[in-house]
Amino acid sequence: MTIIDVPEDLRAPVTLAQKMLIGGEWVDAVSGETLDVFNPSTGQVLSTQSAGGPAEVDRAVAAARAALTGPWSQVTPMQRGRMLTKLAELVEQNSEQLAQLESLDVGMPMMEARYIDLPFSIDILHYYAGWPTKITGDTIPVSFPHNFGGPYHAYTRREPVGVVAAIIPWNLPVMMAVKKLAPALATGNTMVIKPAEQTPLAIARLAELVLEAGIPEGVVNYVTGLGETAGVALVEHPDVNKVTFTGSVDTGKAIARAATGNLKRVSLELGGKSPHIIFDDADLESAVFAAGMAIFGGAGESCIAGSRLYVQRGAYETVLEGIAARANSIKVGPGLDDSSEMGPLISAEHREKVLSYMDLGRQDGRVVAGGGTAGEGGYFVEPTVLTDLDPTSRVLREEIFGPVLSVVPFDTEEEVTALANDTDFGLGAGVWTKDVGRVHRMAAAIESGQVWVNCYQPVDAALPFGGYKQSGWGRETCKENLDEYLELKTVVVQL
Ligand code: NAI
Ligand code: MG
């Protein structure tokens, strides 16, 4: 199987990603079928991946089950932690190569791969590497002995939930995979990872590093394929105990429904339409800079994109001008080109979707910057700023997942709180003000999993990340996340 137009030193991992890792062996789909892998910076096919389906999912789930009850059950908590540390070190040693693979596959600028995707993935692995030795039950004093005999000794055990299916999106593949792999393994589970069909490359290399870290074969399996075949087979599988998913709301709902077959546990990290609020008294220069990063970073293909910018009337003209200037100055170009500040969108199909929202913005409001395609060959669009929108416009309600910002003026704190919360989502939110009372009133009033004040989107391996409302179920990167991968068992012993 050929690979096309791939830098010399990335050929080995790109070739590796043509196969799947099941029970420690790199295999093709039994059907022999493949899916194309595209380079979004050129629009050309660069390689293929195996089109996995129910047959491969069955084998991978069986391998994960065998590892769970076999070799993995013999690994002590301290050893599990060391293996995760080792994996963190291997990811760090290979981070430039992984960053290049991400950039090639996703189109993300090297800057983002080098300074966000990979470093954060390494931090998450280190964070969870500390947990295995600290997962404990309780000894609980009971009050029933005088009624039922006794005395009794009662305690709880926290056990792995079992075989975990992790379904990954295409925007930050390594980071999204690590956000699921690290807690799943820290808590003693085994897993099957399915990358998005758009972006298998770096996760295949990550799976190879998992083996190199000494994690037993079958603990982490890697199956490629379409959502409607491999993805559905995983979420419907009767021997999968939990699904952890990041992606669209519609797919999240489909997964929640599919999981009812055996009532598998479900965690969902879904989309957003995050409000970013600037009051008159804010440091406007910093706020405008952050507002640009919040929507144009990652080409807006981010679940926490600050896509609704609310600006208090007195600052509205200044902010609108500043953000339009920022949009016009961003250098759009191929991911692997070091000078690119914003890469292409993920696919031709997705670009059509984003362009249709730009047209809708033109119809329902006014385009202040951008509004169309950019560059040549790849799936590029312009950083876009819209304003004067009809308040009922779908542009203000639906997740666009592209570099399209809507700017809306407001007068009062009460008004902007209502506007911010008038959404089906609740993932991120930003507030810029110097008024300390208002900081805490707004932080309490906004219905979302994260509120950033005088900053936007700093995330950390130790801070809970997740959403209110239709932004999902559960929280990642935090101690509470461990419970989503653990069963709690009560043991009562009559002494
Ligand atoms: P998607 O949610 O359909 O795909 C994400 C993952 O789910 C992929 O691995 C895919 O193969 C898998 N999948 C799809 N259908 C499935 C099913 N029925 N059962 C099991 N797995 C399934 O997202 P898609 O279609 O790539 O993008 C559509 C929109 O989703 C984007 O425009 C964006 O708004 C949103 N999105 C949000 C992300 C986030 O980080 N919250 C990430 C990716 C997309
Ligand atoms: Mg889809």
Image (cartoon, rainbow, N blue to C red):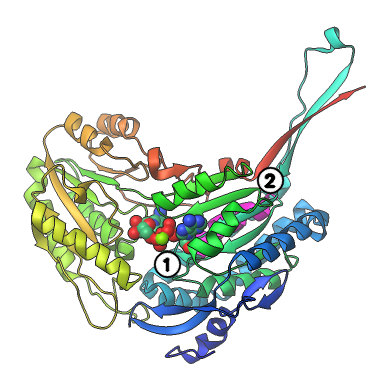
Q: In this rendering, is residue 289 above or below 450?
A: below
Near-viewer residue (451 or 176):
176
At x 89%, y 12%, the residue is 149
Residue 149 part of the magenta-drawn span: no
Where's residue 305, x and y in %?
31, 54
In the rendered view of the protein, which quadrant contains the N terminus?
A: bottom right
Position of 340 with respect to 95 (left or right) is left
Q: In this rendering, is residue 368 above or below 108?
A: above
Residue type of the residue flagged with mark 1:
Tyr
Q: Disc 1 or disc 2, which is closer to the eye?
A: 2
Q: Please tell me which of labels 1 and 2 falls first in the chain.
A: 1
At x 76%, y 54%, the residue is 78
Residue type of the residue flagged with mark 2:
Val
At mark 2, the secondary structure is loop
Say which residue label 2 marks: 161
Where's residue 495, x and y in %?
93, 22
Residue 294, picture quadrant: bottom left
User: Magenta residues?
Assistant: 174-187
At x 18%, y 52%, the residue is 406
Residue 50, picture quadrant: bottom right
Q: Tell me if residue 188 can be seen.
A: yes
Say which residue label 1 marks: 115
Where's residue 314, x and y in %?
7, 42
